[in-house]
Amino acid sequence: MEKVILVTGANSGIGLALCERLLCEDSRLQLCLACRNMQRAEAARSALLTSHPDAHIDLLHLDVGSVRSVLHAAHKVKARYNRLDYLYLNAGIMPNPQIDIKAFFKGLFSSNVVKMFATAEGLLTQQDRVNKDGLQEVFATNLFGHFVLVRELDSILCQAGQTSRVVWTSSSNARRSAFSLEDVQHRLGTEPYASSKYASDLISLALNRHNNSQGLYSSVICPGLVMTNLTYGILPSFFWTLIMPIMYLIRIFTNTFTLTPYNGAGALHSLFLKKPESLDPRAKYHSLTSGMGSNYTQPRQMDIDDDMSEALYVKLLEMEKAARKRLKEEDDNKQAYKKYLNQTE
Ligand SMILES: NC(=O)C1=CN([C@@H]2O[C@H](COP(=O)(O)OP(=O)(O)OC[C@H]3O[C@@H](n4cnc5c(N)ncnc54)[C@H](OP(=O)(O)O)[C@@H]3O)[C@@H](O)[C@H]2O)C=CC1
Ligand SMILES: CC(C)CCC[C@@H](C)[C@H]1CC[C@H]2C3=C(CC[C@]12C)[C@@]1(C)CCC(=O)C[C@@H]1CC3
């Protein structure tokens, strides 16, 4: 049977470019585009089918920021497929980003300028909000929903005699100092994005510790700076177009300016080709692009440790348990109310 691959946030940007690259690699793959907006998902499927008319592409409704939707989607996946070879955890948000202009100009004339362009450290803040599950939206979308999805799919990910892969789209913006075990959702800070991406680095390490023996391998990638809907939310698209020559110039000094979704998906694609046993669980695989435009992948060690990753893993398990309990209570209440209405009719 052909490999089954599920990609979250597959209807645009890096996720869509990954699907295109995977189909170029092997057009017989069974691709499942897991998206919250079915109209955009249909458009993505049509675009992929234009270049790969015989491709097997399914759509799945998944709002990764809602625990109920994650559980429902996982149920559907298990009913549809009896195996899952690759699970790309790519959906992500950066709501209401703000650039600190003063810090930008200060950084421009400092020795840290290359690092600033590569990681955006000290430049970006976001305004988060609480979602329907009572969780911080950035944490829920970028990390927790994906964590629950992996856990819920473990019966088709961890099968005897076969290996499966989970790949997180993290970021160079992930930073230890933006994350705290006492505030894993980043309720109190102004860098929920950096915190959520650092948390994904930690969780990937924990998943390897807990699941390698069952044949499940987790990896983390960074796509570099890519022009997508996410970056068009930071600065308007006309501004990016205006400064594009400067961006190509900066690329000579920092190979992290991958710029196109195709180049950004390079590391995701290269992990597809690598044997799981050859992967380094402590490395982040970076999509890079040289000044001359050649696209390559390079592993770089992450600033993570086992104790912290285990502590976060335990916290997420507790939060998952609480979320499941809350949903069950909601369902029970609904059932009881329906019964009451039936009796009073
Ligand atoms: N662009 C960049 O420079 C970088 C991006 N990244 C990461 O790459 C990943 C892909 O982002 P990118 O392609 O740039 O941006 P896009 O905005 O183009 O893609 C994000 C995708 O995630 C989906 N998504 C967002 N929220 C949810 C949700 N609740 N449920 C399901 N899907 C959701 C979006 O769907 P919809 O269309 O419905 O919004 C979209 O398909 C993200 O994780 C991002 O953090 C990391 C480093 C740099
Ligand atoms: C004159 C221009 C080149 C000025 C651009 C400055 C900033 C807008 C960008 C410099 C570094 C960028 C960056 C990101 C967003 C845009 C910058 C802050 C990301 C945070 C986007 C999302 C990520 O996950 C990582 C990126 C790191 C670099």
Image (cartoon, helix red, strand yellow):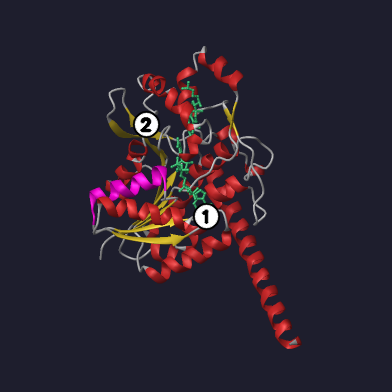
Mark 2 residue's CB less than 8 Å from ligand 1: yes
Q: What residue sits 70% from the left and 73% below the top? A: 333
Q: At which x and y percent is residue 227?
A: 42, 34
Q: At which x and y percent is residue 130?
A: 67, 49
Q: CA distance from mark 2 to mark 1?
A: 26 Å
Residue 260: quarter of image:
top left
Q: At which x and y percent is residue 89?
A: 44, 50
For the residue pair 39 and 168, the one nearer the viewer reads as 39
The magenta span reads: 12-27
Q: What residue sits 24% from the left and 57% below the top? A: 53
Residue topped by disc 1: 64
Q: Amino acid at mark 1?
A: Val
Mark 1 residue's CB less than 8 Å from ligand 1: yes
The answer to whether any part of residue 84 appears in the image is: yes
Residue topped by disc 2: 258
331 up-or-down from 198: above or below: below
Residue 182: quarter of image:
top right
The quarter in which the N terminus is drawn is bottom left
Q: Amino acid at mark 2?
A: Thr
User: Is tag 2's residue or tag 1's residue first in the polypeptide sequence?
Assistant: 1
329 up-or-down from 10: above or below: below
Callout 2: helix, strand or loop? loop
Q: At which x and y percent is residue 39?
A: 45, 56
The quarter in which the C terminus is drawn is bottom right
What secondary structure is the stretch in magenta mostly built from?
helix
Left or right side of 180 for 86: left
The answer to whether any part of residue 211 appears in the image is: no
Residue 25: say if magenta: yes
Q: What residue sits 47% from the left and 64% below the top? A: 74
